[in-house]
Image: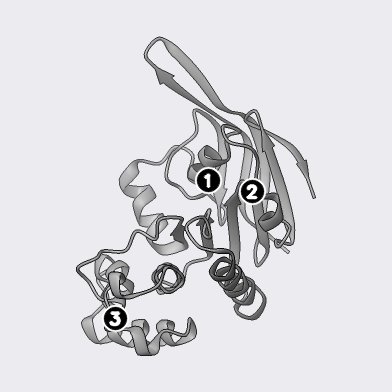
Amino acid sequence: MKSIIELKDVKKTYKMGLTEVNALRGVTMHVREGEFLAITGPSGSGKSTLMHMVGCLDIPTSGTILLDGQDISKLHESDLAQIRGKKIGFVFQSFNLITSLTASENVELPLMFQGVSENERHKRSKAILEKVGLTERASHRPMQLSGGEQQRVAIARALVGEPNVLLADEPTGNLDSKRGAEILDMMNALNKDEGVTVVMVTHDPVLAKKAKRIVRIKDGMVEKEE
């Protein structure tokens, strides 16, 4: 199974006034195509910074990041944005849906930025909402949906562009245990049945155990893999 994401001796240092914070201290790891990986660790361990690296949301201070064989560690933001739009789908704890848009319109939004035609956007939005079980809620706005339904819309939006990787940052953090379990089951099904590569960032060791492989981060370094 080939690696779709590779990090080689990645370091990230932030300057806060006169202070330097070493968020990552030389991380080397990989994400295999088609796997379900959990990145976990305590608050302040560096896992959020690592998510930014894996998701092309930021570039490292030093080291190399390969996404599907392409070195992205020195690209400009405009180039990173294009790569993110095509290859990575994001799901966040806070859903990040636009309240004035319907579920269907929220899902279509990334396709608009990619220049996809209106008819094709409607077609793909309808298909992906059916896949996540929200066909009858397509015309509802976020405030008319439950938390679990909003997160399913967010997952549909992340998948509509057919990305290589689904990156989920604390995806069940704002949900009760039942709805959280439903979202986790959905991500497992997408990974198992659709072959979607899933990277989940979580501080919860119980959630992390649902993944096929766990990378534990501590003090900006990989502590261990399971």
Q: Which residue is mark 1?
A: 51
Residue in front for this viewpoint, 190 or 195? 190
Q: Which residue is mark 3?
A: 121
Q: Earlier in the sequence, mark 3 or mark 1?
A: 1
Residue in front for this viewpoint, 134 or 196? 134
Question: Residue 7 location, x and y as percent?
Answer: 62, 42
140 sits left or right of 208 in the view: left
Q: Earlier in the sequence, mark 1 or mark 2?
A: 2
Question: Residue 135 location, x and y as percent?
Answer: 39, 88
**Labels 2 and 3 touching (C-beta < 8 A):** no
Alpha carbon separation for disc pair 1 and 2: 8 Å
Q: Residue at x 44, y 68 (%)?
A: 151
Q: Residue at x 60, y 50 (%)?
A: 202
Q: Earlier in the sequence, mark 2 or mark 3?
A: 2
Q: Residue at x 41, y 84 (%)?
A: 134
Q: Which residue is mark 2?
A: 39
**Labels 1 and 2 touching (C-beta < 8 A):** yes
Which residue is the extreme one toward the left? 100
Q: Amino acid at mark 1?
A: Met
Q: Amino acid at mark 3?
A: Arg
21 sits left or right of 161 in the view: right
Judge the density around disc 2: few (<14), some (14-19), many (≥20) Cα neighbours within 10 Å: many
104 sits left or right of 84 in the view: left
